[in-house]
Amino acid sequence: MRAMTFTDQARAAKEASRTLGTLNRGAKDAALQAMADALAAAQDAVLDANRADVEAARSSGVAEAMVDRLSLNPDRIAGMVNGLRDLAKLADPVGDVVRGWTNANGVQVRQVRVPFGVVGIIYEARPNVTADAAGICVKSGNAALLRGSSSALHSNRAIVAALRDGLAAAGLPADAVQLVEGGREVTDELMAARGLVDVLIPRGGAGLINAVVEGSKVPVIETGTGNCHIFVDATADHEMALNILINAKAQRPSVCNAAETLLVHAAIAGEFLPKALASLAAHGVTVHGTPGVAAYSADVVPATDTEFDGEYLSLDIAAAIVPSLDAALEHIRHHSTGHSETIVTNDRVSANRFANEVDAAAVLVNASSRFVDGGEFGFGAEIGISTQKLHARGPMGLAEMTSTKYLVTGDGQIRG
């Protein structure tokens, strides 16, 4: 029997997408419940597979932050299962009327949501993305071609096998969810599959995202890295600011909505920074600071010139003192990746200026950047967080996984 090629997989996905695109909500929700049941039943197999991936990662010297992204446990699998069940509870975006009107000649025009068709997703490490992405694609009527990283291969195989069993149990084509395996040449095939794959979504580090954006012939929805800032304004409540800072940095440092830079207004630096540095240290966070910040603690590591430009994805944070809101805004404009930016303030004018002038997918006032997440937004699972400015920006849920088409209805009108 001939081995299945990527082109075979893409054609099978295209065929499956035609079935999914015509399903009503009840059929899709039943499939999601069956996928959840199958994944829950496969927990032991998934954990066994994940242990093999984690052991291989540790033996090859992968950083612990990346190992955390890779690791599964019963709670994380339960989260994946519940994410599928939560998707089944959400409204189906397919068929929603975005806008509609009747022209003077009686012709009715409606713009309605429709599935993309086949969605390719290229992502790194986190195997929970496999279940989230598959569920969102099924609910929005799309077939999914999942290209996970080799570091999570065993985990992804076990998860996809369970999801496909669930689809089959619901009477739907298992090829609606497929794992794409192979070397770099297969990734190149996926990026070149215009006509078979309708949209491609990269999710991971800057290197992966840039490679897909620059090399793909398939239309791309660009997700982005998260160099997320917290600006503590002169009027900020110190206890609130400390709680937000610790939650945004230390609650789960390996994710893209974790804080990476702390900016403190000079007017409160002398009072706030000693408390902030002590609290960060107590939570195991290393601060990489400018000389002004380092003056408040011998534990501060001097920040390099490029320290403020990237993601740590670890228990590290860059810190600087700024003389004003204007300086904070300028720093963020220069260094932000356009993901999530936070101000802590009791001044309404400052809050409004920050909200209006910061150019990012999400702007937060007196709240942790860890809230920038599809689940926290009420979207159910998310496909990723987009930092581009096209139809999808911020956490991408069901609506963002649809396109639109126009339905034009008349009773015999012709154009003069």
Image (cartoon, rainbow, N blue to C red):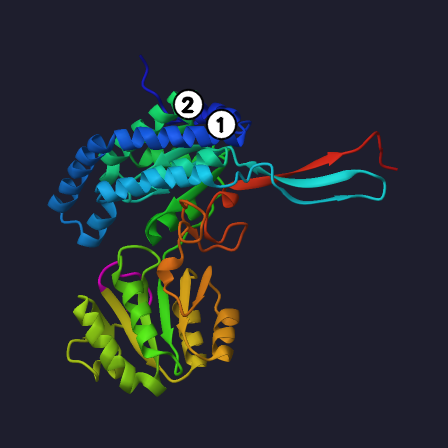
Q: Quadrant of residue 408?
A: top right
Up the image or down, 129 lies above or below 266; here it is: above
**Residue at the right extreme, as displayed:** 416
Residue kind at label 1, given as amino acid type: Ala
Q: State the image coordinates of residue 331 (x, y, percent, origin top left).
A: 40, 74
Q: What residue did someone put label 2 on?
A: 170
Q: Is residue 263 magenta?
A: no
Which mark is drawn over residue 27?
1
Is 171 in front, or is 15? 171
Rendered residue at 20%/37% (across/down):
50
**Residue at the front extreme, as displayed:** 89
Magenta stretch prevailing secondary structure: loop
Residue 45 in view, yes or no: yes
Q: Which residues are magenta?
A: 306-315
Residue 191 in view, yes or no: no
Where the C terminus falls, by quadrant? top right
Dot 1 falls on a residue whose secondary structure is helix
Q: Residues within 10 Å of mark 2 (few under 14, many from 20)?
A: some
Where the N terminus falls, by quadrant? top left
Q: Is the residue under label 1 in contact with that under label 2 (CB below 8 Å)?
A: yes
CA separation in Å, label 2 and label 1 = 8 Å
Q: Is residue 314 magenta?
A: yes
